[in-house]
Image: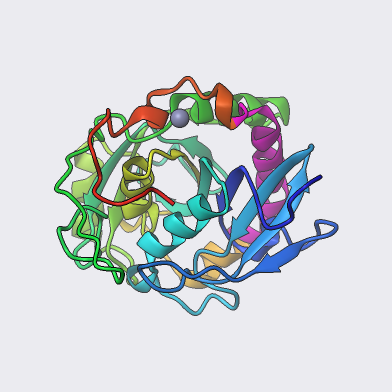
Amino acid sequence: MVNKANAELGVIGGSGFYSFLDDVTEIQVDTPYGAPSDSLFLGEIAGRRVAFLPRHGRGHHLPPHRINYRANLWALRSVGVRQVLGPCAVGGLRPEYGPGTLLVPDQLVDRTKSRVGTYFDGLPLPGGTVPNVVHVSLADPYCPTGRAAALKAARGRDWEPVDGGTLVVVEGPRFSTRAESLWHRAQGWSVVGMTGHPEAALARELELCYTSMTLVTDLDAGAETGEGVSHDEVLRVFAANVDRLRGVLFDTVAALPADGDRDCPCAGALGGMEPGFALP
Ligand SMILES: [Zn+2]
């Protein structure tokens, strides 16, 4: 029998991804780090149990720097999720990555400032457990299996994706200055967003697979000659692409391996190191 309070796959993204699914179960999950951004919405896609979590909360009330990323990843794992898809809107840093581009990054640069990016901070949890100091590898921040599935899913829907590239994550909520944007581009980075970190790093610490899928909604300030990014433009392009992005997500979900069949490095990210607390 299907346990409706359980899921094996997680999607961190807005309500556009689950609101029309049949038979969605809403559950509230608490964590040692406080409440996640919202309830988890559990449904089924292609026979797989999927938990959706609105990253910014329903109504989009949480700015990127105030999202409780630790609670979000913890909550997903606690209901059984082992593989996470993290679609997000980004700015393109190169003219060829215009609005509507789907880029599946293979690298990440953290330029955030105020976010807690680890579970291994040495501070006691509410029950008194003190996490150990553990250093995980984030050399390759994304799950290779998840990336391959996402790329194949996009191609299957005639949406040729950009395979690889670097996502630079800024603090926000403001957009970049023209000088910042030109600097990001000069580094050879591909797209800029506000939520990809610390999601990927926290997922790794919990031995979760994490796959980023970025939808370019605008050219960043240094990559175009107009007035720079506006929030209205971002929303307009995202709305125009959410249907096909949902299609790619669902096909990716259907193609991901069952938990017991994960053969990527993510599942053993701690390498036997003792976290000092029980993974949820
Ligand atoms: Zn993996």
Residue 37 is at least partly visible in this image: yes
Residue at the top extreme, as displayed: 263
Q: Foreground residue, 276 or 85?
A: 276
Residue 257: x percent and y percent? 61, 26
Residue 15, image x, y percentages:
66, 64
Residue 269 in percent (x, y) is at 32, 32
Q: Residue at x 66, y 37 (%)?
A: 253
Q: Please say whether residue 218 is visible from this viewpoint.
A: no
* Residue 184, magenta (yes or no): no
Taking the spot 84% from the left edge, 59% from the top edge, the residue there is 23
Span of residues in magenta = 238-258
Q: Is residue 248 above or below residue 192?
A: above
Give the image location of residue 136, x and y in percent. Answer: 22, 37
Horizontal side of 161 relative to 135 (left or right) equals right
**Relative horizontal placement of residue 69, taking residue 41 as reference (left or right):** left
Q: How is the image coloured?
A: rainbow
Q: Quadrant of ligand 1?
A: top left
Is 256 part of what is drawn in magenta? Answer: yes
